[in-house]
Amino acid sequence: MLREDRPFEGFNSRVEQALAAGHSADATRLLRTRPGELARRLDHLLRSGDQPEDVLATFARVAEQVSTAVLLQALAHFQHRGQAALRTFFPKGDAARAWCTPEQRAALPGTLRTQVIAHLRAALVARFATRPPLGRCYLDPALADLKVPLAQRSAAKALRTLVRGSRLPLPDTRFIRLFLWWTNGRERTDIDLSAAFFDGGFGYRDVVSFYNLRHYGGHHSGDIVDAPKGAAEFIDLDLELLRTRGIRFVVTCINSYTRQPYCDLPECFAGWMARDQVNSGEPFEARTVEDRLDLASDQQTCLPFILDLEAQQVIWTDIGLGGYPRWNNVANNLSGIALMLRAMSDLATPDLHTLFELHAEARGSEVDDPAEADLRFGPDGDIDPLDLDRIRAEFL
């Protein structure tokens, strides 16, 4: 784009030119006028110059102008810096998709990382200290497995609202029954339920699907290719048998084989049940349903959740896969499924324990005994971690 026969030079262009020329001080001065951008580029700036202390000092002066969400994201980033082999991004758009790239950034010195974390925590504590006092607070340790409800796009609507990357405990049961229900759209619709098995090193072992009905401890109910009045598919998982055979991760996959997006279907939902015995009760028994999600996105492949059999947890993923393979099944999406498993099993995003810990430090004190607390944070406490609207309104 030209203006008066000269190339148009925007703000980001000037920043990139300064960084490319090795003038990190100039880039820092530019970004100081946009504190949010400075926070997002803080890692890059600290690696680009020979005076990271000046960058930190500049950031400390403008940190109060950075949004709470960005400060929390930066804090989680530096707390997990260098711990994962992949960097995961969720680009803007109308689809819940993730992109991954290998971690290739230069390492930050441990002392520098500690200083950055201290500055970020100080900025958040100072902000939260302006709010009413909370008194003595008890924080359930399980909050560390639940993510902060920052803005996100979903691939599905769920029975209970969870944030992508959150982990929930598996119930004390031997059998899990995955289920899928759908109804035809304007034409014949074939939706397939599959379960992909991976070991602890993220190595693919096998899949239970319409073309491989049983293996390792998984049993598929059989392929249904048309649902004019509605149809269901099930997969029974023997968790004990899967563990003894070296399986750690079970990735639930839902594929539109006839390539209609879920948003074009009158009904399409999936979930999982906890069963004491696979042959007890009805095939679909509502009282045993642990989670159910409605698939309504403009996508053809969805990975709603992952079972981590070693940690005894469910990882809420709620993402779709891009691409349009000729045959939409697990085999043709395997590289994407394996990549998403690695990315989602170690997602560096803010957790609720850190958020509430900062509030307790700023507005009260933290106690170890819930009986001594004025306010309890946790599933059985005063602040329910699944009450995301309240968390957004009162703590972000």
Image: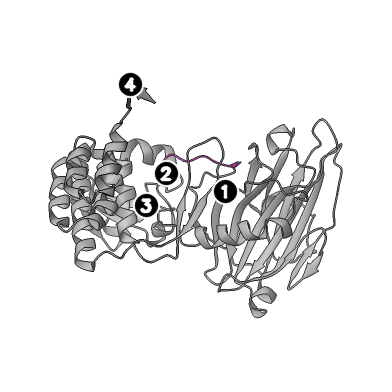
What residue range appears in magenta?
149-157
Which badge, 4 or 1, is on the more N-terminal residue? 4
Residue labelled with disc 2: 149
Label 2 crowding class (10 Å Cα cut-off): few <14, some 14-19, many 20+?
A: many
Label 3 crowding class (10 Å Cα cut-off): few <14, some 14-19, many 20+?
A: many
Which badge, 1 or 3, is on the more N-terminal residue? 1
Q: Element under label 2? A: loop
Residue labelled with disc 1: 318
Give the image location of residue 204, x and y in percent: 65, 69
- Identify residue type, mark 4: Arg
Which badge, 1 or 2, is on the more N-terminal residue? 2
Residue labelled with disc 3: 350
Residue 176, compared with residue 253, is above or below; it is below
- Identify residue type, mark 3: Pro
Q: Residue at x 44, y 65 (%)?
A: 85
- Rendering quarter of residue 392: top left
Q: CA distance from mark 4 to mark 1?
A: 45 Å
Residue labelled with disc 4: 3
